[in-house]
Amino acid sequence: MNQGFLSAVLDFPPIARVRRNHALEHATMQVLSEHGGTRRLAGRSSFHGFYLYGDIDAEEVLGAAQEGLRRLRAGQRELAIHPSCGSNYVVAGAIAGLGAFAALGGFFGHRQEGLRDRVARLPLAWAVATMGVILSRPLGAALQAYVTTDADVADLRIHSVIRTERSGAVVQLVRTQN
């Protein structure tokens, strides 16, 4: 793929904004983790900001988002990379799935192969899939660093934190502005 085309897509204003919000989401979750230990939180970024799913106080979210934004601006780009980001799982699934598919003869399999031949290759498929998951860790982080997040938050500002409860689940919307 043409790198100029990819840059144009990633720099397209609506996409660039989601990428910056995604970086701030990760930074906020990293700060929350540093301050309060382990929590069961999930996040999702959008054009308008990001959502945090989990029972947490809105003031605590606001403080962590402000600190995360300050630290990203100070050059702590690593805060934009989160080990539990869905991007990591997508990369792991894609590499493991393609590797297992290839090992089972998916690309070059013979039409007359029987089930016994495919079953005999299962250990190879498991080994290839496991290697794919291991390799996905640095690749998932690279995907976050270069595609799904943008640690250069520029003039991004936190507008508000809105807490809602839906069916007993607490949702925080951190609204941002440029």
Image (cartoon, rainbow, N blue to C red):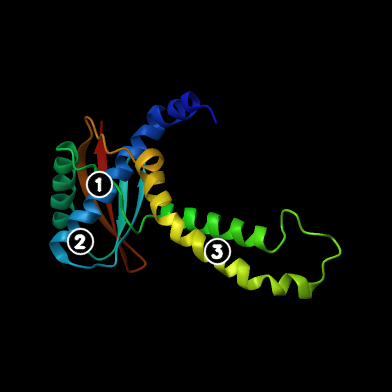
Kindly identify which residue carries mark 2: 33
62 horizontally vs 41: left or right: left
Question: Which amino acid is tagged 3?
Answer: Ala
In the rendered image, residue 50, in percent from the top left (x then y), is placed at 31, 47
Residue at coordinates 39% horizontally, 32% vertically from top-left?
14
Q: Earlier in the sequence, mark 3 or mark 2?
A: 2
Front-most of residues 118 and 41: 118
What is the number of the mark on residue 173? none
Front-most of residues 125 and 143: 125
Inspect this view and state whether residue 85 appears. yes
Determine the CA span between mark 1 and mark 3: 28 Å
Instruction: Indicate the quadrant where residue 19 lies.
Output: top left
Kindly identify which residue carries mark 3: 129
How many other residues sit within 10 Å of disc 1, few (<14), some (14-19) or many (≥20)? some
Q: Earlier in the sequence, mark 1 or mark 3?
A: 1
Determine the CA span between mark 3 and mark 2: 31 Å
Q: Quadrant of the N terminus?
A: top right
Question: Which amino acid is tagged 1?
Answer: Glu
In the rendered image, residue 57, in percent from the top left (x then y), is placed at 17, 61
In the rendered image, residue 43, in percent from the top left (x then y), is placed at 33, 55
Asked if residue 123 is positioned above or below residue 138 in the image, the reply reads below
Residue at coordinates 26% horizontally, 34% vertically from top-left?
152
Asked if residue 147 is positioned above or below residue 154 in the image, the reply reads below
Kindly identify which residue carries mark 1: 78
Question: Which amino acid is tagged 2?
Answer: Ser
